Structure formats: structure tokens, C-alpha cells
Image: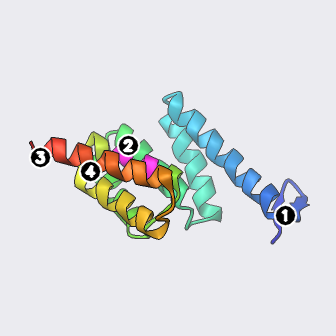
Amino acid sequence: FVACRDGYCSETREEAASMATNKHRAIYDAIDNGNHRNALKLIGTLLSKKPDDCLGRALKAVVLHRSGQVKQAIQLAAEVGETKPADTDVLEALLVVYGAERMYDEATKLFDNAWQQHPDSEELGTSTFQCLVRDAAAIK
């Protein structure tokens, strides 16, 4: 596994993962600062190189939602959800979209699928429980 950046190549997965994490961090920073246009630009660059990046696609759904493009955000969140992600960062990003639209049942399905994939994960178990509580509270 080799990843290249700025003419330098890394020989380890850790170095390649670090490069991806830095790109995600820049996207998070743009979102946190309310700079949605820049966030979409960064996401576009990331997805042009890695179109299947679930976290990038989930973050794009968040940015679309915050930009008022709710239908597109929900559609993209559903597409990412169909991949049955188990990464907590992806799940939390999708929860932002589904939570804002009070679609707690969709969030519950996502976290439940992830917990079924990793039944020993206390974090996923707790998050699934929290989603179930939100879903039950919304029904009342």
C-alpha cells in the first residue's frame, strides 16, 4: 500500500491514513467555521480522488443540509447508509443530518447495523441505545 502526496510516498498504512485524516480535518474546520463553500470544494477534491470515501460523502451531506439543500442531503445520507457503515465518524455525521430532520428511525437503523457488525463495541452499543431513546421520545 503506497500513497503519494506532494511527490513523497508513504510505505505504511498509518502514513496514508494520516494523510486522509488531515484532509478530513480540513473539511471539519471549514464546516465548523461555517465556510460551506470551501468545505464543498475540499470534499469535491477528496471525492474526485476517492469517490467511495464514506466519511467524505457523509460530511458532504452535512454541508448540503446546512446550506439548505435538505433533499439532496437526505438522499446522500441514505446512499451512504446503504453501505452499512460501521465507522463512528461516518455514523455521527449522518446523525447530524437525520437528527436535524427528526428522522431518528433512520439513525437507529444505521447504528443498529453497525453494532451488529461489531457487537463487542461498547461505543456502538451506547450510541444505538441513545438512538433508540431518541426514537421512542419522538414517537410520544
- The amino acid type, in three-letter code, at marker 4 is Leu
Residue for badge 2: 96
Residue 21 screen position, x and y as percent = 68, 49
Crowd class of label 1 (few under 14; some 14 to 19; many from 20; radius 10 Å): few
Name the disc covering residue 24, or none.
Answer: none
Callout 2, which amino acid? Val
What residue is at 60 percent from the left and 47 percent from the top? 42
Out of 102 and 23, give the one closest to the viewer: 102
Name the residue located 53 percent from the left edge and 27 percent from the top edge.
Answer: 33
Left or right side of 63 for 102: left
Residue at 17 percent of width and 41 percent of height: 137
Q: Amino acid at mark 1?
A: Thr
Can residue 60 be seen?
no
Residue under numbered circle 4: 132
The tally of labels here is 4
Overall secondary structure of the magenta section: helix
